[in-house]
Image: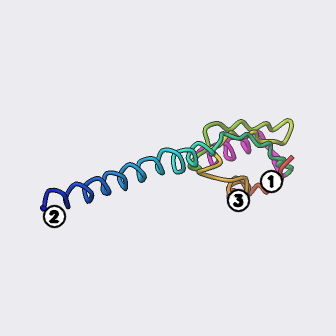
Amino acid sequence: MCKQALKRPVSSAWGVVTMLRTFFMAVVLLPVASLAAERTVLLNIPTMDCASCPVTIRFALLKVAGVSRATVSYRNREARVTFDDARTSVQVLRATTQNVGYPSFVK
């Protein structure tokens, strides 16, 4: 057998491995990234007692990685937070409000 005949199957096998790796990334790994979704949660914050409390809470929530929107209502004592659930979680949002002095609960 000549060297050229031996090289062809090896290079073909390598091509198959490369093709399978590319296929795996396209079919398995990329859809996993798309499983992350934007979610909105409503947090009850009963300890707000002045008009400046919502400002403090909103700024703290907006600093959390993954939070795209936060609205805080003093009147309703609640915060509506929109976030990327691949980057943060409800538990992190609750801990954030707790850290600035306002414990919160999911409504």
Q: Nearer the viewer, mark 3 or mark 2?
A: 2
Residue segment shown in magenta: 47-63
Q: Which x, y percent locates residue 82?
A: 68, 39
Asked if the residue under mark 2 is in contact with the one under mark 3, i.e. CB atoms within 8 Å, the reply is no
Under mark 2, the amino acid is Met
Depth check, front residue: 106 or 11: 11
Which residue is label 2 attached to?
A: 1
Q: Residue at x 79, y 36 (%)?
A: 73
Q: Residue furthest front?
A: 1
Q: Earlier in the sequence, mark 1 or mark 3?
A: 3
> For the residue carrying disc 3, how many other residues have a C-alpha within 10 Å: few (<14), some (14-19), or many (20+)?
some
Which residue is label 3 attached to?
A: 95
Q: Is residue 3 shown above or below 68?
A: below
Under mark 1, the amino acid is Ser
- Which label was assigned to residue 104? 1
Under mark 3, the amino acid is Ala
